[in-house]
Image (tube, rainbow, N blue to C red):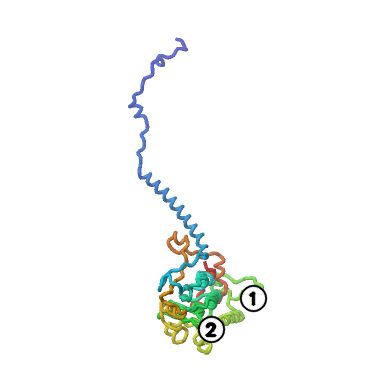
Amino acid sequence: MDPHATPERDQRPPQAVPVASLAAAEPPRRRSRPWVRLLCGLLVLGLFGSLMLNLLLLAATGLTSLDADRKVQEKFFSHQRGGADKVAIITLSGTILSGKGFIKDQIDQAAEDSSVKAVVLRVNSPGGTITGSDYIHHHLSKLAGESKIPIVVSMGGVAASGGYYVSMACGKTGVIFAEPTTWTGSIGVIIPRYDLSELLQSWGVAEDSIASHPLKKAGSFAKPMTEEEREIFRQLVNEGFTQFKDIIKRGRPAFQEDPEALDKLATGQIYTAGQALNNGLIDQIGFLEDAVDKAIELAKLDKNRVEVVEYQREPSLASVLLGGEVRQEQTDLAAMLELTVPRAYYLCTWLPPLASSTEP
């Protein structure tokens, strides 16, 4: 046999494979599962939504820092819409911190508007820092003096301590209204302090600060207060207290003639509206509308030609997007350290405000 000859079986023509056999040899295709597609779609939408929400929150957080630059807008309150003259309602609400927040914006708005002929100061505040209270009082008094317009005070639920201090900006020609349920008074000064030395000692914590002088550590909550330190803080309180009473005497001339009567009231006690009226701390019991009518009367305005407006903060883009007012609270180290600083307050409480004195 020829070794180079092709075997007989190799010389046979190739056999055709039936189509059915090929089809049977192919692996079966997987059936489409709609729920998998739905799950993937929901996952993509969720990731996209989360991304957009985070971007929105970041934008809102950044925009809150612009709140202080927002303008003041007017809201019609009563009387003649579009009247030639205006009575502006300036609102002081909440704890007084630096005094340079929205309350100052409202005062500036009234000062720049020549059509404002009278102001109603709506006070609903337990007071706050001495500096902030005096700052607001100063600029309100300046507004009344330079613009020669009357200021009528309308007290809300609470107008105590620094809230009462600020109310003295109405001056000798103004009138103070308090609602029947108003609490006011609380004339006095407080420097909150807590001695935690025994508690820290039980935890094994000792006060061991290095200072240029022992008085540099005066007021520390980590050690008992010495008599020398107590006397120093007492002098600070007395000075602020004297200033408080002097401001009241300017706003309430009757106490200037009878300072002993003021001394009897200036005990830090809170008074009801009726008690405040009987003791000469306010002039009348009435509501905001009564204060508005009195302001119109004092400014000698025509009720048919005056528009009463209430100042409100112009909404920011952040508040519009998120459907409400957004505030950025200070929780940084600087704000925490400020809570440890001894500070005097015209405040109706024995607790210090848990916030920085820098308003947003």
Residue found at the very far left of the displayed protein = 20
Q: Position of residue 181 (x, y in %)?
A: 40, 79
Residue closer to the observer: 178 or 230: 178
| Amino acid type, mark 2 | Arg
Q: Which residue is mark 2?
A: 250
Q: State the image coordinates of residue 14 (x, y, percent, origin top left).
A: 38, 19
> Hey, which residue is sitting farthest top in the picture?
1
Q: Is residue 33 visible in the rendered structure shown here?
A: yes
The residue nearer to you, when weighing 117 against 320, is: 117
Viewer-side label of 1, 2? 2
| Amino acid type indicated by mark 1 | Pro
Do the residues under discs 1 and 2 have CB atoms within 8 angstroms? no
Residue 65 location in percent, x, y? Answer: 52, 62
Q: Residue at x 56, y 68 (%)?
A: 337
Count of residue discs: 2
Mark 2 closeness class: few <14, some 14–19, many ≥20 residues within 10 Å: some
Mark 2: secondary structure: helix
x and y percent of residue 98 in the render? 54, 71
What is the quadrant of the N terminus in the image?
top left
Q: Nearer the viewer, residue 247 or 51?
A: 247
What residue is shown with label 1?
214
Residue toward you, 318 or 205: 318
Location of residue 319 with respect to 235 vertically, above or below: above
Which circle's residue, 1 or 2, is located before the other in the chain?
A: 1
Side of 253 where 18 appears, left or right: left
